[in-house]
Image (cartoon, grey):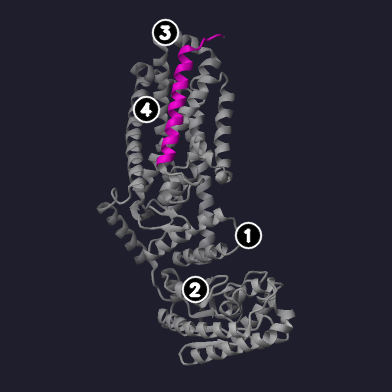
Amino acid sequence: MNSTSRVWRTTGLLSLLSTILLIAGFLYAVKDVIAPGAASTAGDEAGFNQGTAVGSGEESGVPPSEDAKLLNVTAIGDSLAKGTGDDTGKGFARRFVELAKEQGADSKLVNNLGINGLTTAGLLELLKEKGVQYSLGQADIIVMSIGGNDLFDGAESLQTAGRLPTEAELEKSVTEASERLGEIADTILEINPRAQLVYISLYNPFSDLPGMRKIGDEAVARWNHIAMDLLRQRDRTLVVPTFDLFTYNSQKYLASDHFHPNGAGYQIIAERMIQGIH
Amino acid sequence: MMALVKNETIKMIKKKRFYVILLVLLVLVPIFSYAQLRAAEDKRSKFGTDWRREVQQAITDNQNSLGSDRVPEEWKKYRQIFIQQMKYYLEHDVNPRQPGAVAFTKEFLDNAATLFIPLLIMGIGSDIVSSERTSGTIKMLLTRPIRRWKILLSKLITLLMFVSLIVVATFIICYLISGLFFGYKGFNLPVFTGFKLQGADVDISGVHAVPQWKYILMQMGLIWFVSSVVAMLAFMVSVLVRSTAASIVIMMAALIAGNILTNLASAWTSAKYLFMVNLGLTQYLAGTPAPIEGMTLGFSLAVLAVWALGSLIVSFLVFTKQDILN
């Protein structure tokens, strides 16, 4: 009898305490969700600050060591940076890292920040984000591909609508986007004052379309010229040309969407990159 | 009354149901912890200890999926809110996935809130009345000179006592065991709460930091409420159905239906009045969008309360009027 009594007393007490605790938690949660702020002021700030201290004390902003052979890569920009069209998903960024490793360098891909459909305006917005700045800051080499969507924005939708962008339209997009390109380069070089900025210049994805070949070539050539000129004026930059690769080899190097490179196309771009860097 | 509750509590302990539940937790939590540990190791091999890179890559990957037409609009909503939350963490330099027993427990409670813990509750709730019937002891109970409603009430109180014990025990077991894997630290790390979805945008005006221990306390409180409601429903089924097996099946089917409905029902808006789709109270805390448009914490609490109240009324009416035949 004594033992049942003890069981009852401990169970009863424990469940009473648990219930009180849980009701308190419940009321607090309801208050916090329905009227946030009211329930959370001084106490939470303390917790927040402590957490920040833990976070930043640990590993924040540790720059990669000053090893000449260290080639950490961050890719940023549009679908080409992302690697769209590459069946292995590697893109030139990861392929570059593989090549660098083969050559004995200590290389890793910090982040691939490529976003499908990104334009120069979108990239400028992206560069304001803290996480993006952090990833760029960790890199020795920043690979950028941008501009294609400014020039051929909606080219795919136009294509399906049976219309191709006109010469004047392309001309206008080149001028506008090139202004932003300079700003982008400055911002990136400022975010990471050590890294080399490698710009992958454009090719004409429409070189196999008779109607588009000429005006596409003109727009791309003009863009590449402007980009070369802009980046030439800045230190720590490198422009990797791709125009020639795709001029006669679009069958070989373009993916089935006739716009993005395929695996072989990305591979050959990565090889060009490493030739320029070593 | 006290004597009756005591009697019921001792019966509950003697029947060893509670121990079975503890045992289930003791077996499953190490398995979950180990799985989580492997996942963490896998990530570490890719990203090192640099959580910022990992979070940023998660943001970029989700941004890319937003542009795809192949992704359903509802998923995009989840991903959008995820992107905003992750950006907020980066902005404030706080690791959203700081590994540790506390973070694991938080994650576990989030996932267990709608199915796992209610299932445990059913384990003790479903047979609290029907087992007396199956074994025939109900006659002994009712021949005593005590009003029937008092007997039923004592069972209900006992059930609710064990609901609290189960919720707290889940936390304790989870924390102690996962601590072996991840270390016991992290009670003061901040969690951001208060993200609200306004159309396609995420409203961050109400976002504020809460230390993890407080966040877990809030989670447990909400889970306790859900569990109590499930317990009362199981209680009603236990009164209405003679066989324990049948009452467990009924409750289980209802819970699982709820899980399926929350994945399917966003087009059928009246489903939000069913109790099963309202069990995920912790999602209001985490800021994930509700399964059906127009659901808020207040709404879910009201729906659950109405269901609980209804089931209590039915239980007591039926139990006091019913003839006990066999």
The residue tagged 2 is A122
Residue A111: percent from left, percent from top: 51, 71
Looking at the figure, which quarter contains the N terminus of chain A? top left
Of the residues shown, which amino acid type is indicated by label 4? Thr
Mark 1 and mark 4, same subunit?
A: no
Looking at the figure, which quarter contains the C terminus of chain A? bottom right
Residue lying at 56% horizontally and 91% vertically, measured from the top left: A225
Depth check, mark 4 against mark 2: the one in front is 2
SS class of the residue under badge 2?
helix
Pick whichever of labels 4 and 2 is earlier in the sequence: 4
Q: In the drawing, what numbered circle is on residue A11?
A: 4
Determine the chain carrying the residue at label 4: A
The residue tagged 3 is B144
Determine the chain carrying the residue at label 3: B
Determine the chain carrying the residue at label 1: B
How far apart are the two marked residues, 4 and 2, measured between alpha carbons?
61 Å
SS class of the residue under badge 1?
loop
The boundaries of the magenta stretch are B298-325
What is the crowding at mark 1: few (fewer than 14 residues within 10 Å), some, or many (at least 20)? few
* B304 falls in the magenta region: yes
Contact? badges 3 and 4 (CB < 8 Å):
no
Mark 1 and mark 2, same subunit?
A: no
Contact? badges 4 and 2 (CB < 8 Å):
no
The residue tagged 1 is B70
Q: Is B132 rendered above or below residue B75? A: above
Q: Is A90 rendered above or below residue B132? A: below
Of the residues shown, which amino acid type is indicated by label 2? Gly
SS class of the residue under badge 3?
loop
Residue lying at 42% horizontally and 21% vertically, measured from the top left: B155
